[in-house]
Amino acid sequence: MDAGESLLARPGFWSNYLSEICAGGANAERPVPEWFGEEGADVDSLSEILFDPERWPVLRVPSADGSGVVVVFRNLVGDYGIDFLLIHPDQSYAQQIASWEGELSGTGLAWRELVRIAENPAPEADGVDEPAARLLLLLPLLILNDLEVPEEASARLSAALTAVGVAQDLALITTEHLLTGLTGKSWHDPAWGSPLSS
């Protein structure tokens, strides 16, 4: 396993990581890298690294209280997937809470727990410490356990996408696709204006 936190800054990471969520909604459009401000060639290039059987990138999301989540790209030949492991400060082992193998299975996290972990990085621990990236890394876990997404989610996700480099106008559209995929129904925040309006 390789520490993979540096991969988050590479073009194509967020498309590789979050596009499948966008594909999950009813009547969903086919996700495209442009939703994340990325290009297809970058996505393909990074995909070769993320899913290389010689490497198993690991993304650590530790919290200040000693808990956290570890995201592991499980690259066994014929058994590719992404595993999500929960760390407890009072346990010597990580508990697998979910895995992605074409679709997600497991228990996941409630929105409030996801936000708590995202906003409370462990200052001395190795891993991702930027709250926006932490929130986006944990986002797939929300699919499993919290279908009623709070209204604050749209603003938080849009801000997180902007913080990782997605243009603001794209971030609004991509947030809508992500929330549609998360909830399984069409999502539109009434506070959003049309992307075509001035």
Image (cartoon, rainbow, N blue to C red):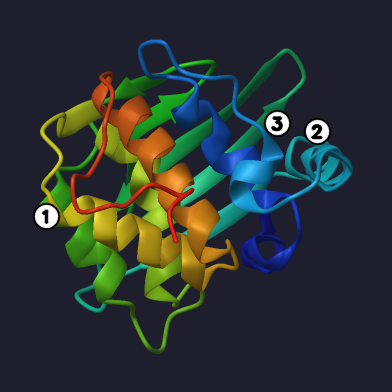
The CA span between labels 2 and 3 is 5 Å
Q: Hey, what amino acid is under mark 1?
A: Arg
Residue topped by disc 3 = 75
Q: Residue at x 11, y 55 (%)?
A: 112
Between the residue at mark 3 and the residue at mark 1, the CA separation in whole angstroms equals 31 Å
| In front of the other: 160 or 63 | 160
Residue sitting at 39 percent across and 46 percent down? 175
Amino acid type indicated by mark 3? Asn
Q: Position of residue 164 (x, y in %)?
A: 55, 67
Pointer 3 with pointer 1, Cβ within 8 A: no
Kindly indicate the quadrant of the structure image that contains residue 144: top left
Drawn side of residue 4 relative to residue 17, left or right: right
Determine the residue positioned at 65% across, 39% down.
16
Q: Position of residue 51 (x, y in %)?
A: 75, 35
Tell which tag, 3 or 1, sits nearer the viewer.
1
Q: Residues within 10 Å of mark 2 (few under 14, many from 20)?
A: some
Mark carried by residue 112: 1
Q: Earlier in the sequence, mark 1 or mark 2?
A: 2
Measuring from the top left, give residue 147's x and y in whole percent: 16, 29
Q: Is residue 89 above or below residue 13?
A: below
In the displayed structure, does residue 146 sit left or right of residue 104? left
- The type of residue carrying mark 2 is Pro
The reply to whether residue 40 is visible in this rendering is yes
| Image height of 185 relative to 34, above or below | above
Say above or below: 113 vs 160: above
Question: Dividing the image into 4 quarters, which one contains the C terminus?
Answer: bottom left
Q: Label 2 belongs to which residue? A: 53
Separation of marks 1 and 2 at Cα, in angstroms = 35 Å
